[in-house]
Image (spheres, rainbow, N blue to C red):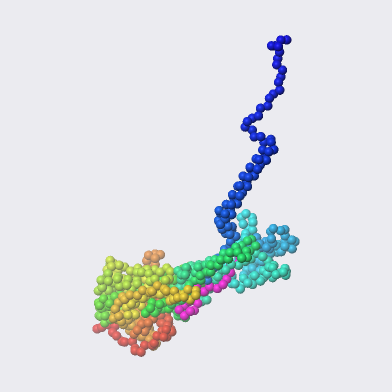
Amino acid sequence: MSASNRRPAASTPRRYRRSWQLPIGRSSLRIRSAMVIGALIIVLCGGRAFQLQAIDAEAFADEAATKMQSASTLPATRGTITDRNGAVLAATEPAMRIIADPDQVVTNGADKRYPMTEQQQAEADAAPAAIAEILATHLGGKPADYLPTLTKKRTDGTYSRYEVVERQVPAATWLEIEAAMRAGANGDGRPAWYGLAAETNPIRTYPNRSLASNVVGFVNGEGVGAAGLENVLEDELAGQPGQSIYDASRYGRIPFGTNVLVPPVDGNNYALTIDNDMQLLAEQELAEGMSTSGAETGMALVMNVHSGELLALANAPSFDPTALGEAETRDLGNRAVTDAYEPGSVQKVLTMAALMDAGLIKPDTRVEVPPLIASGSGMVKDAFSHGELNLTVRGVVAHSSNIGTIRLARLLPKDQLSNYLQDFGLGSQPETGLPGETSGSVPGADMADYTRDQISFGQGLSVSAVQMASAVAAVVNGGVYHQPTIIKSATTADGTPIELPEATERRVISEEASTQVVDVMEAVIAGVGNGSRSIPGYRTAGKSGTAQRFDPSCKCYNGYTASFVGVAPAEDPQLLVYVVLDQPSNGSSGSKLALPVVQNIMQTALPRYNVLPSTTPAPELPLDYE
């Protein structure tokens, strides 16, 4: 075979090194790579450590401290409310809110990090029933009533950590419960039963129960004012809670850690113008008057005519703030400021005051009074039947003649009459500081002629009892309107006086007109009734009111409102008593139903406030003429 035809012999394959492959097979390179990676890790860790310890050290320290801190609220003590003489009407007593930790109850406080011993398990099994027995003994009820709370679970099946067992438990009762929890078979000083604790939860007390309750009001279950002065003075009475901030771990406070105390600021204290003894008398006499008259509701007040201070402000039916569950919702308010009604013939006092101040009439001015008088599309008559009468202004008021009043009121322009009534405080809130005040209503200058006729004798306008009393007080005290007040003074918790807004006052009529009106009001007491309306030793003046009652539910007149206002002594009026009986069922006359209540209150009030008896008899002045 020739060389050219010979097949080449198979050759051994060659190995080629890829230029891109790392020589990781060599131990020196592996060591270098590990060192580089280790160096990078060290640099990163060092940088992070530098960030934590140098750059962000303060921020992280603050965050850690915050997580370690615990805070608790320190409640302020609610301020007291007293009468003008310091008798307590509302005060706060220490009390506790008892809370349960069901998670601790069912384990009886055993440390969950370690298995329970046989004894611990037995104690845990017995704990709920034992604690329930303690609660029933000291709080009342049955042990079974407390078991659901003591063993309550969350929706995820774990035991709750916070459940309220009872609110406003007297502090002494909680101490008894604590002692019972500690007593047991352990004998080593630690509580026999675990899982109960207490938080401050003061009780608001009302020592006089229903006395002046419509004025004072009450607090709700959370200790927040819900009615009366407790409500409108909530921020001032409640004060400002404090706070305790401290470092703590799961095992309690950390010694020498953060300990910041912001003390609470206790609430302000208020003294009212109310006199407890006079309030009690007014409430008792009002209750008697309602029983006699069969009235559905009633109001009675006593006022100092020279200052506008309310010495008593009674409402009936009332309520007991210590037994709110028994109270009717409609009785929780203060009708003397919230309810508007048509005043009836007591309004004639204001009409005569306006006419006398305008110089249009005097007590002896003569008035011809026919049996009827046309007004609008109808006729107005008096409450008593009569023919032609010749009365003085004194006689018109004493006999409460609507017709005579209409004839006199027509002498005064309608805009002036409206302005006088508004100056007397009608048609605007009296701003006593009590909640829910009504403004009532007074027709303006554009009133119809028949409306002017109506309001002259007490229909066609509406007032509250406090509004009407304040207006009459302005008539008889020399002609100056004083804003009615219920708060006499206030102090901070440490006794520092608090300046109160100054009550407004304004002259409405002249002193001469005031004297003249008292003259005609005295004729109501001395000129009729053969002395049965007088109070022994004192000259008194007054005016009755018998008004048809407007019923908003049917927008019609339905029933009556009987009232009487009395002032004494007539020669120098000091006190005013006003009584209103709504929807009486045993008559409707203010002179027969409300006057006796006024007399009973007034004859006690006059000597109580050192008002000297009259030294001259009531004058016998003419009520009519030939």
Relative to 596, does residue 122 appear above or below in the rendering? above
Please provide percent x and percent y for residue 205.
53, 73
**Magenta span:** 78-99
Q: Is residue 385 magenta?
A: no
Identify the residue at image location x=68%, y=66%. Answer: 193
Relative to 522, does residue 554 appear above or below in the rendering? above
Image quadrant holding the N terminus, namely top right
Q: In this view of the protein, which residue sits in the foreground, 493 or 486?
A: 493
Q: In this view of the protein, which residue sits in the foreground, 445 or 187?
A: 187
Q: Is residue 83 magenta?
A: yes
Q: In this view of the protein, which residue sits in the foreground, 94 or 405?
A: 94
Res 425 seen here: yes
Identify the residue at image location x=65%, y=62%. Answer: 251
Relative to 435, does residue 363 appear above or below in the rendering? below
Answer left or right for 573 relative to 158.
left
Please provide percent x and percent y for residue 44.
60, 47
Please provide percent x and percent y for residue 568.
37, 83
Where on the picture, by quarter, is residue 484?
Answer: bottom left
Identify the residue at image location x=51%, y=71%. Answer: 266
Residue sitting farthest toward the right:
118
Identify the residue at image location x=43%, y=69%. Answer: 435
Count the numbered circles shown. Answer: 0
Residue sitting farthest toward the top:
1
Res 63 seen here: no
Q: In this view of the protein, which residue sits in the foreground, 327 or 88?
A: 88
Residue sitting farthest toward the bottom:
615
Image quadrant holding the C terminus, namely bottom left
Please provide percent x and percent y for residue 203.
55, 71
